[in-house]
Amino acid sequence: MLVIAATIIWSLNVVVVKVALQHSGPLTYSAIRYVIGGLTLLLLARLLEGPLHLPPRGDRLLLVALAASGVLVNQASFTGSLALTNADNVAMIAATTPVLVTGWVAWRSRVRFRGRVWLGMLLGLSGVGLVVGAGHWSGWVGIGIALLNPLSWAVYLILLPRVLGRYPPLTLAALITAVGALMLIPLGVFQTVASPPHPTLAWLGLLAYSALGAVALTTWMYLPGVRLLGPARTAVYSYLQPFLAVLAAGLIIGEPILPLQVLGGLVMVVGVAIGRPKPRPTAVVSSRLSMSDAPPTPRPLSIGEVDCRRP
């Protein structure tokens, strides 16, 4: 339920950002959003996981690379494509992440998935195609920019296992988000000077949802779900995002919901149901351990154990 709730929040955020960009540039909005979200995560990490310490010198360059791929490029492409094309197109392209991750895992590691997992993935992609194919495609430049979103996240996932076992999860998320926010600030300032935003009370409310809800709250909610289910199982829930984004667009900004899109959503649900990898016993056992019970030097996770949600 935590994973599904987080997915719903992210799906709504696609429409929220689309509406908010009518009053500000994409880089301005991303910078402000991630500064607020990063500060909130730093506060949560300090309260829940203890004092924050400067990372070792050997990890600093890697954390910068993680922030560049997982926040800077990822969010610049996300908001930039939303400014140029439809919300459902952006959500569809982002939903290809599980296939990219599963393909990488099958090719580069020893993890092997059963046929039903691949069938579920294919059904999920088919549902995505129905959802978006029923709508109107526009802005091919925006779609090209949107492709950077799953690609940058794939790079993020390849790098993440090198540090994932050495930090408490919320602390690691806070560090990456904060460093990524610092990278976005110069771009946001440049765009703000060139094209100042026009904030309203409604825009501030949308910004609060994007920063506190879609960045800080979902990170806080998602971690228990990942510990209980295992990252491989949580990844396939990304297929629900395009269908939920279409529903949100219909309810919030009045975009039509077509029968073929509803059919695509049902196909995605079936794909999620049959395509979830079996839970690993270690995922459940580790969820029962507090941070104080964990070994002092936990092993780095393999790429097959990394979550593929968007930060």
Image: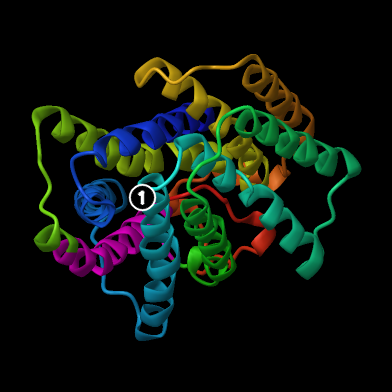
Q: Say whether residue 173 is magenta.
A: yes
Query: According to the image, label 1 marks what residue?
Result: 79
From the top left corner, tell me how far across and down residue 27 is, in percent: 26, 57
Number of disc labels: 1
Which element type, helix, strand or loop, lies under badge 1? helix
Q: Can I make out residue 277 in this image? A: no
Q: Nearer the viewer, residue 242 or 102?
A: 242
- State the image quarter where residue 201 is shown: top left
Q: Nearer the viewer, residue 170 or 101?
A: 101
Q: Which residues are magenta?
A: 167-190
Q: Magenta segment, principal secondary structure?
A: helix
Q: Residue at x 79, y 30 (%)?
A: 274
Q: Nearer the viewer, residue 272 or 263?
A: 263
Residue at the right extreme? 115
From the top left corner, tell me how far across and down residue 80 is, in percent: 37, 53
In the figure, is residue 270 to the left or right of 202? Answer: right
Q: Residue at x 20, y 36 (%)?
A: 208
From the top left corner, tell me how far across and down residue 92 is, in percent: 58, 40
From the top left corner, tell me how far across and down residue 94 is, in percent: 55, 47
Q: Say whether residue 224 is magenta.
A: no
Q: Amino acid at mark 1?
A: Thr
Q: Label 1 neighbourhood size at 10 Å, few (<14), some (14-19), many (20+)? A: many
Location of residue 233 with respect to 72 vertically, above or below: above
